[in-house]
Amino acid sequence: MSKPTKAPAKAAVESVPVVDPYLPGSGNTGYRVSRYELALEYKVSSNRLSGTATITAVTVTALRQLTLDLAGTLSVAKVWVNGRPPTRFATTADKLRITLAAEVPPGAALVIAIRYSGSPRPSETLWGEVGFEELTDGALVSGQPNGAPSWFPCDDHPYAKASYRIELSTDSPYYALANGELVSRRTRASRTTWVYEQPEPTPTYLVTLQIGRYESRRVPGSAVPIQAVLPARLTDEFDRDFADQAQMMELFVRLFGPYPLAAGYTVAITDDNLEIPLEAQGISIFGANHCDGTGRSTRLIAHELAHQWFGNSVTLRRWSDIWLHEGFACYAEWLWSQHSGGPSADELARRYHQRLAGLPQDLLLADPGPADMFDDRVYKRGAITLHVLRGRLGDDAFFALLRDWTSRHRHSNAGTEDFTALAAGYTGESLQPLWQAWLYSTALPALD
């Protein structure tokens, strides 16, 4: 059996089918991953990551070569497929290309083990830096939309959901947080190994690591378990700023349906400031600047919690459907505002409609384009669209629709057409004029 070799530095880059035109370099074809098992070691002082990723998949077409997304900053030392080395593997253009010894048929099981290492850093993208990032004293992962390959080989597209086992060994003074339930924690000498199990199907971009000098504490008063992972110095500020977490959870469970994750919900606060909060499966990440004791981040706290239903459990099928994440989470902010005695959802819809009227009318909500998919107009116009729909359906039917949506597509993927089709069953009138005006036209409609 021939020894695996790496491609020469100037080897031609083979084309890979485009899975999603918004991120043409991300995602792969020919197989489906069901599980990732990551056994990693991270050295904080040198920003050195090493370990093995074991990927369980099944082929959906006949395959002689397969690809995985992996940043060029990480070097692959060895690859095994079903326990044997492949004929060849090479990393080019942020793709790990593996040539198998023989073609495998559709429906074949694959267990791909990859030993790799490097100094991870965030990827430079159209939306800024995303992925694995060093902090002043620790590290974080911000994966949306295509940052996962900055720290592990994967099929990086939202439809490619899988379960995870994440084992991370790092310096003992540091707390390591990952998705799912902490199933073991053991310390030997100067290092601690943390093991997390995430059984619910999870997209790669929602998998995270948070490493810092943190402590963990339970947030009281919630039927759904909530914990906080944060620097000890921010405890008092957290108690003030995040005092409403249990009440938010209670409201959203009532309006949106059962909380979708068995392990509960974790709020992580980094010791550094962050430009914006970040969502991950079962985890929301905030910077120290969002936990300053002033209460100014309440709407962001509600927004990130709502993503556990809208975006994390029910995940878009393609990135053009991003309003199904951000419009829904933004509307949850307004629902919390009204519930907690602030401006009503109707007041906020009218306020932001007025602001949108003064902005360029060139955004198509159902297909905003990659450059604008995180534009604030997607968030606000998406939320207003839901408010208009609520006015058309009435509260009982509208919230029944949202609960049906989160139940029907729990831990799966759905698109705009799925939502509009489902909504049609909650009224005897045609909703096509509403969708045409709000989703499929650029001009901002009047707010009735």
Image (cartoon, helix red, strand yellow):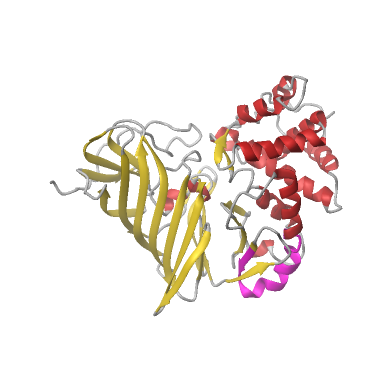
Q: Residue furthest bottom?
A: 189
Q: Is residue 383 visible?
A: yes
In the rendering, at what x and y percent does residue 270 appear? 59, 65
For this view, does 177 lie left or right of residue 5? right
In the rendering, at what x and y percent does residue 59 appear? 34, 36
For this view, does 266 lie left or right of residue 207? right
Note whether 45 is above or below 414 in the view shown. Answer: below
Q: Indicate the quadrant where residue 432 lies.
A: top right
Q: Quadrant of the C terminus?
A: top right
Tally of marks: 0
Note whether 433 is above or below 73 in the view shown. Answer: above
Q: Residue at x 70, y 32 (%)?
A: 360
**Magenta segment includes 388:** no
In the rendering, at what x and y percent does residue 242 appear? 72, 62
The magenta stretch is: 227-245
The front one of 352 and 156 is: 156
Q: Residue at x 79, y 31 (%)?
A: 388
The front one of 146 and 223 is: 223
Q: Is residue 135 visible?
A: no
